[in-house]
Image: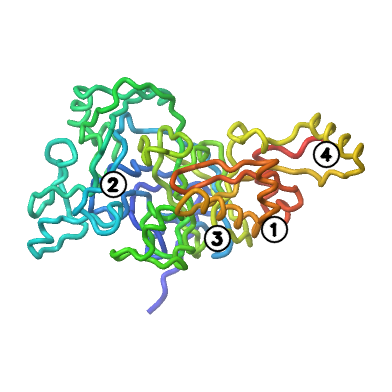
Amino acid sequence: MAMTAPAPAVDRVVVDRYTDIVGPSNEMLGPVRDGGRIEYLTVPGCWGPMITPSIRSGHEVTLPVRVEGAAAGDAVALHIETLEQTSRATTSGTHTGWDGHYLSDPFVAGICPTCRDAGRHFLYPDTYLEGTGDGAVKCVVCHGEVNPFHMIEAYTMVFDDPKGIGVTVSKERAEEIARSAREWNALTEHSTQHPISALARADLVGVMTRCRISAENLGSIPAIDLPSSHNCGDFGAFLVGAEHEFAVTEEQLELRTDVHMDVDSVRQGSVVIVPSKVEGAGIYAGDVHAMIGDGEIAVHTTDIAARLVVRVEVVKGLELDGPILLPPAEDLPFLSRPFTAEEVARGRALAEANRTSLEGPVLPIQVLGSGPFINAAVDNAVARAAKLLGMSQDEVKNRGTIAGAAEIGRLPGFVQLNLMVPRERLERLGILHLVEAQYGAPAGW
C-alpha cells in the first residue's frame, strides 16, 4: 500500500480543538513552517475542566502543532506576539478534593461513587449541570453528585471592555452570570468543559484588581503521555506511584517538558524556548489567566479564554530539559537587568583599579525549574543551568545570588532562576540572537 505523503508546511495554523492528555499519542496539527505562526483559540484551563470529570487532567489545552524541522534534541523558540482575552467573566477560588469522588488525584481520575458501588463503569463519568454550587455536577447515568472538588472560598469576577480591570461581584450578579455562563466564559464549540461560572460563587465581593494576561501552559509535548496539568515537576510528582492509568516512575517523569509554568511573565512580548522531545516538537497552549500573583498561593487564579499567536523558530541542536524564558525587560529583577554603558564604565574602572579584568559582556536569561516543593524546584533549575552553561552548580548558585534571583512562579514548586550569562556562552548555545533581540546588544563593553 502506498504511503501518504506528509502535508506541506504552512505559514499559519489556527487551533480550536482541545485535549486533556499531552504526549506522543496526540494528534498533531500542521505542520507549521519554521518561522510561521500558530494562532490558538484557548479556553479556560483549570476550574471548568476540574469540575468536568470526563476531562482526565483538570486542564483543557489545545491540540499540539507539528513544527517543520524540529527534531528530538532541538529546541523551539516561541515568540508571543498576541495575547488577547475573550472571556467577560470567570469564577475561581481555593479548593479541596471531594473524598470518595476520585482515585489518588482529583485532577486526573474523577469517579462516580454511586456507579462504582453499583458495579457499573465509574471512572471519568459523563456529566451534566443542574443547579449551582459544588453539587451541581451530576452523573448522566445515576444522577448522583460527582464533582471531584469542593470550592472552599470562591468568587466570580467580571472584566471591563479593555480587559484591564476586574471586579468580584455579588451573589445576585453571579447568579445572573451563571444562567449564561458558557457565553460569559467564552467557551468555544469544541470545548467539553462545564463553564465554572455556572456554580455562581460569590464569597469574595467588591475586590478590584488589574489584569495582566499570561499563558501558563504553553510549549512542547512531553516524550510520554501525561495529563496536561501534570507536565511539570510539582503536580507531576503526584503521578509517581499513583493508582490510576497515568501513574509514572520518577525516571519517566524526567520525560516531561515543564511547560505548565504558571509564570506571570509568559505574556505578550516574551520569548519561551522549549525543548523538542519528539519529532515535530508538538506546540500546544492553554491555561491563560487574566492575572496571577507570584506564587499563585491560592493554587488557582482567573482562568480565561484567549486568542494567542506565537511565531515559532527552531533552534537546532539545543537540547533542553525544560524551558528558558526571556521575559519583557521590565519584568526582570533588579540584579539581572542589562547593564547600561555608564555602569559598565564604572565596573571596568573599579576592576582595573583592583588589577582585575571584567569577564566580558553579559546578558540575562531565566532557566525554569520545577519539583515537588520550592527547594527541589530551585535545585532543578540550578542543575539545568549548570548543564546548559557548562558551569558547576556552585558557580550557578553564586551567580544567581549576586547577579540574579530565584523567583517563585507557582507553589508548591516552580521557579525562574535569573542569571547574567557571558555573551560567548549564549552564542555557543545558538540563542544569542534571541537574547539580543529581546534586550539589545550589551552596551559599553
Across and down, in percent, residue 309 comes to 47, 41
Quarter of the image that includes the N terminus: bottom left
Task: Please state which of residues 67 and 378 is positioned toward the viewer in this rendering.
Answer: 378
Task: Please state which of residues 424 and 235 is positioned toward the viewer in this rendering.
Answer: 235
Query: Which numbered tag is attached to residue 445?
Result: 4
Q: Residue at x 42, y 38 (%)?
A: 296
Q: Secondary structure at mark 2?
A: helix
Mark 3 to mark 1 CA distance (whole Å): 29 Å
Type of the residue with mark 1:
Ser
Q: Quick check: 50 left or right of 414?
A: left
- The mark that comes first in sequence, 2 or 4, is 2
Mark 2 to mark 1 CA distance (whole Å): 42 Å
- Label 2 Cα neighbours within 10 Å, binned few <14 / some 14-19 / many ≥20: many
- The mark that comes first in sequence, 3 or 2, is 2
Across and down, in percent, residue 110 comes to 23, 54
Type of the residue with mark 4:
Trp
Q: Is residue 173 above or below residue 246?
A: above
Query: Which numbered tag is attached to residue 156?
Result: none
Type of the residue with mark 2:
Pro
- Label 4 Cα neighbours within 10 Å, binned few <14 / some 14-19 / many ≥20: some
Query: Which numbered tag is attached to residue 70?
Result: 3
Q: Secondary structure at mark 1?
A: loop
Q: Mark 3 against mark 4, which lies toward the viewer?
A: 4
Mark 1 to mark 4 CA distance (whole Å): 26 Å
